Amino acid sequence: MRVSLFTCIALLSPMLALAFTPQPSTRKLQKLKTSGSVSTPLAPSFTVANRGGALGAVPGWAAYTNALEEKPLITKAMTSLVGWALGDFLAQTFINKGPFDVARFLTLSAFGFIYHGPSGHYFYNWLDERIEGTGVKQVFSKVAIDQIFWCPIFMSVFFAYLGLVAGDSLPAIRTKISSDLLSACKGSWKVWPLVHAINFRFIPNKFRLFYINAVQIGFNIFLSIIGTK
């Protein structure tokens, strides 16, 4: 199950990135054809402009992008809440197939809101400020920092959060982290280097968490299983 899940996530990631591509207007294309000139950009740019790329026609997308500009922290927190809620709902509905655990659902949804969204907001802002650009060297450096340093920290906080909510003792939480941290990181390393290579290369900063949550719905199924087993 894990292999097919990770394969689907890896294949879905580039497709999601394409949704951010600005679509040239028909009038502009006709003008280029008439003049006989072709403009070739120096580098690919997925800067979601006013049209929002392919997502510009989605109802509510303009309001969402405005919210990202005006209230980025709370908007990203709500985005992660939805991503984690949907991930656990799908895990419980189609994989566990037992009685729906409302407490688990609320616990994981809350984690998306209080930690994943806010921490992602500050971490990716910090990373983009420290390493500017979308070249190969910059993208590689960002992916390495994300997966070597941020991933273990994030996973440790995730397991600690679940343990505290469940009322586990600190020794029990340490045992959980010791036994499952490497497995969780290995699961991440199968998927997220490719996802983040696309993320750091093409996705504008303010849309990073939206893109990550769209991909992470599948990965959250894995986390909800390993985190609550």
Image: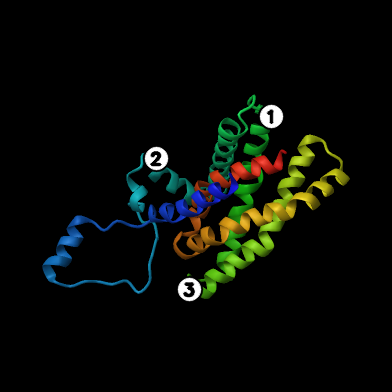
Provide the residue designation for mark 1.
103
Horizontal side of 36 relative to 94 (left or right) equals left
Residue at the spot x=69%, y=29% of the render? 103
Residue shown at 83% from the left, 38% from the top: 168
Label 2: element kind: loop
**Numbered tag placed on residue 42 in the rendering:** none
How far, Cα to Cα, is label 1 from label 3? Answer: 44 Å
SS at mark 3 in the image = loop
Q: Amino acid at mark 3?
A: Gly
Q: Nearer the viewer, residue 190 or 88?
A: 190
- Say which mark, if any, is on residue 60: 2
Which residue is disc 3 drawn over?
135
Viewer-nearest of discs 1 and 2: 1
Q: Secondary structure at mark 1?
A: helix
Neighbours of disc 1 within 10 Å: few (<14), some (14-19), many (20+): few
Residue 41, quarter of the rendered image = bottom left
Q: In which quadrant is the N terminus drawn?
A: top right
x and y percentages locating residue 112 in the rendered image: 62, 43
Q: Is residue 73 above or below residue 152?
A: above
Number of numbered tags placed on the structure image: 3
- Decide: is 34 above or below 73: below
Answer yes or no: is residue 210 visible.
no
Residue kind at label 2, given as amino acid type: Gly
The numbered mark, 1 or 2, whose residue comes first in the sequence reads 2
Tell me the residue at 57%/44% (across/down).
80
